[in-house]
Amino acid sequence: MKRSFLTLFFLFNLLILAWSQSNTLLDFNQTRLQKQKTGMLVLGSWAIGNMALSAALLNGKQGENKAFHQMQIGWNVINLGIAAAGYIGVMRSNPGSLDLYHSIQDQYKMEKILLFNAGLDVGYMLGGAYLLERGKRDNVKNPAQLRGFGRSIILQGAFLFVFDLSLTAIISSDNPKIAPLLSRTQIRFDGQQLGVCASF
């Protein structure tokens, strides 16, 4: 009788522990996905706002200002596409389907993508500065267009640089939660065997 009670008590505690661990991991994944979703909404809002403003201001513009607003619209069509694809990807993700390994892998993968994009953003700003400088020369074709495009690309690159670094900081703020997830007791069940690995 005493042995049956201890076995039942042990199994009950394992179930509580497994439930607690899965909820903690679920919360971790839900938080990351919510942050990514908010980031895509910010990027999409920036894109729509830029396109609407530039479309409204484009009428009657000539030369450099016309080129600036044309590039604003073109650049933000791409931004909107990236934001929409990212948002749809997050909405299709199932935070409960990820185990600990894949949760951590997805966390760091997102950070690496954002940091890589921040590097590209610096390249965009340098490219825009090059176009702006080249547009100051008299011996080039359409110097006003080059200057307008350059100004727009510098602006978009600067926004994306701040956006990517900010989202990286926001997502990586959950990194301290990874160590407790790793140190918790791991329970595995493959359909035939129940395994417990506890850290002391």
Image (tube, rainbow, N blue to C red):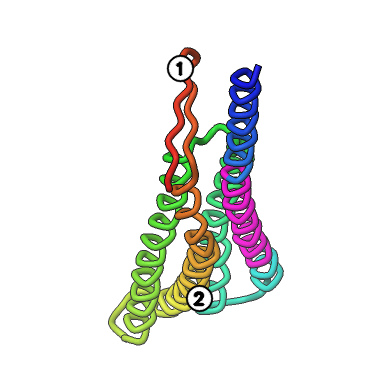
- How far apart marks 1 and 2 lie (CA) works out to 58 Å
Q: Which amino acid does the dot numbered 2 rest on?
A: Leu
| Position above or below: 27 against 157 | above
Closer to the camera in the image, 117 or 190: 190
Task: Give the crowd class for mark 1: few <14, some 14-19, many >=20 residues within 10 Å.
Answer: few
Task: Give the crowd class for mark 2: few <14, some 14-19, many >=20 residues within 10 Å.
Answer: some
Task: Quickly name the residue at label 2.
Answer: 155
Task: Report the residue at 63% width, 21% height from top.
Answer: 2
The label number, if any, that marks residue 193 in the structure image: 1
> Does residue 94 appear in this view?
no
Classify mark 2: helix, strand or loop: helix
Task: Report the residue at 43% width, 76% height from top.
Answer: 150
Q: Where does the image place residue 7, in percent across and percent down from the top left?
A: 59, 22
Q: In the rendered view, does 147 fall on the left or right side of 81?
A: left
Task: Report the residue at 56% width, 32% height from top.
Answer: 97
* Region in magenta: 25-51
Classify mark 1: helix, strand or loop: loop
Q: Where does the image place residue 49, in percent across and percent down from the top left?
A: 68, 65
Closer to the camera in the image, 124 or 198: 198
